[in-house]
Image (spheres, rainbow, N blue to C red):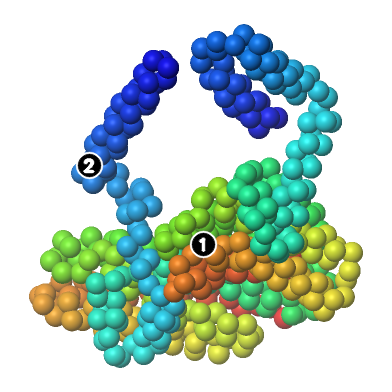
Amino acid sequence: MEFEVQENQANNSIQGVINLQPQVNQVQAQQQEIPIKQTDLQVSSTLEESVAVTLLRDLRQIGVKLRCVLVPTMSTNNARELRNWDLWGPLVFCLMLALTLSMSGNNDDGPGIFATIFVLIWVGSFVVTLNAQLLGGKVSFFQSVCVLGYCVFPINLGALFTLFFSFFYLKMLLVIGCFMWSTYSAVGFLKLLIPEQKRILALYPVILFYLFLSWFALIV
Amino acid sequence: MDFGIQNQTDEQQQANKESSNQNVNEGNKKQSGCCAFLTVEFYTPYFNVTENDVIQRIQGTFLPLKPDFLNLIRGNPDLWGPIWINATLIFMITAIANLRQIDEEKENQSFVISYVPQATALLYIIAFGTPIVLAAVMKFLGVDLSFFQTICLYGYSMSTLLPITILCYFQNELFLWLIIVYGFANSSLFLIVNLKEELDKLQIQKKYIIIGIVVTMQLSLYLFYKLVFFSYVTE
C-alpha cells in the first residue's frame, strides 16, 4: 500500500510542478488539473479498500516477482522487475520454511530449529551480499537480499514434499533438484554483476548458503 | 520565460553547492579514521584475491614445514579465506555430526540443531578473537606483523579442519583421536613455523609467550572439537 501512495505522491508532485508553471492558457490548466483529481481519488481508494484487496495486490506482486526470479530467462523485463525490490517475499518464504521444518516430526527442538533457520536465512543473505559487494561487484544491497530470499522458494517446496515421503533416496533426489534450481536462479542473477576473475569467490557463498538450507530440508 | 531562466540559475546554484558539499564530505571521509572501519570501502582492499590465490594459500597450510605462507600473503592479506573457510566448517560440522547419529538405527533419532550456534561461536571466536589478542600482544612485544596478516594466517590455518571434519564421520574412537592429534600438530606447526621468522627477532621469553598463546588456543580448539561435536557415541 505504501508503494501506491508514494507513486501517487510522485505523480502528484510531478503534476504539481507542471501546474506551478504559469499557464497562460486557462483551458490547459484545467485539463492538467483533472489528472490530479484522479490520482487523489486513487490515493483515497487505496486507503478505503478492503484488507483482502490490499493483501491480494501484494500477493500478486510477490507472485510476479517470483516468476521473474525462478524462471531463469534473462530478459530485460525481468531485470527491470527485479529492481523494484521488496522484502515481503523473502519474509514469507523464510517463515514458511522455518515453520515447515520446525513442525516436522524428526526433532525435539522445534523453536530452536525455527530460530536457527530464521537467523540463518537473514544473516546468510546479508553476509553473502556483503561478500559480493566487498569483492567489487556492483550489486545493490537490498536487491540482492531480495533475490536470494525469493530463490529460497524451491527449497520451501522441497521441504513441504519431504514431509509426505519417507523413502530417503527419493527425498534426497527431490532436495537435490530443488537445491540446483535455487542455486541456478540465484547464480544467474548475480554472476553478471561480479568481475570475471572473482566470480567463483562470490558465487561459492551462494552455493554454500543454499546447500545448508537444502540439507536442513532433507534431514530435519 | 523569466521565471524559467531563474529556475535554471537556481538549479545551477544548487548543483554547485551540492558538488562543493560532496568535496567537503569526501575530504571528511578520508580524514575521519575513527569510524572508517564500519564502512564497506575500508575492507575492500582485503578481498583482492582470485580463486587461484585462495587455492594456493589453502595448499600452503597443508605443508606446515615450509615457511612460505607469509611470503604468499605479503602485501595482500585477504579476509575471504578466514570468513568462508569457517562458514564451510560450520556447515560440515553440523552435517557430519548429525549424520553420525543418524546411522545408529535407533527408533527416535533427534536432530541436534544446537551444533550450529555452538560451532559458529567456537569457530569465529577462535578464528577472529585469537588473532586480535595475538596481534595486540605482538604489537606490545614489538613484532612487526600487521593485524590483517595475523587474521589471514589464523583463518587459513583452520583449513586443516576441513578434511578432519569429513574424516570424523567414522565411529572408531581411536581413529578420531589420532586425526585430532594430527590436526593439532599440523596447524600448530604451521602457525609457529610461519611466525618463527618474525619471532626470532625477539628475546627468548617473549618468543615463548607468543608460542604459548598459539599452542594453548589450538589445543583448546581441537579439544572442544572432539568433545563437543564428535564425542563418543554410545551404541
Q: Can you tell which mark lies on residue B27?
A: 2
Percent from the top left, x then y, of residue B235? 72, 81
Q: Are marks 1 and 2 in contact (CB under 8 Å)?
A: no
In-image side of B48 versus B105 (left or right): left
Figure check: A81 above or below A157: above
Residue A202 in sight from this viewpoint: yes
Q: Residue at x 14, y 65 (%)?
A: B141
Residue B185 in sight from this viewpoint: no
Q: Residue at x 69, y 76 (%)?
A: B99
Same chain for labels 1 and 2? Say yes or no: no
Q: Residue B16's quadrant in the figure? A: top left
Percent from the top left, x then y, of residue B183? 44, 84
Q: Nearer the viewer, residue A130 or A21?
A: A21
For label 1, count other residues whose C-alpha is less than 10 Å away and answer few (under 14), some (14-19) or many (20+): some
Q: Residue at x 74, y 73 (%)?
A: A176
Which chain does the numbered disc 2 sit on?
B
In-image side of B111 versus B93 (left or right): right
Q: Residue at x 74, y 53 (%)?
A: A66
- The secondary element bearing badge 2 is classed as helix
Q: Nearer the viewer, residue A131 or A53?
A: A53
In-image side of A16 versus A115 (left or right): left
Q: Residue B46's quadrant in the figure? A: bottom left
Percent from the top left, x then y, of residue B113? 65, 61
Figure check: A172 above or below B110: below
For label 2, count other residues whose C-alpha is less than 10 Å away and answer few (under 14), some (14-19) or many (20+): few
Cα gap from disc 1 to disc 2, whole angstroms: 29 Å
Q: Can you tell which mark lies on residue A193?
A: 1
Which chain does the numbered disc 1 sit on?
A
Q: Quadrant of the N terminus of chain B?
A: top left
- The secondary element bearing badge 1 is classed as helix
Q: Can you tell which mark lies on residue A184?
A: none
Which amino acid type corresponds to the residue marked 2 in the rendered image?
A: Gly
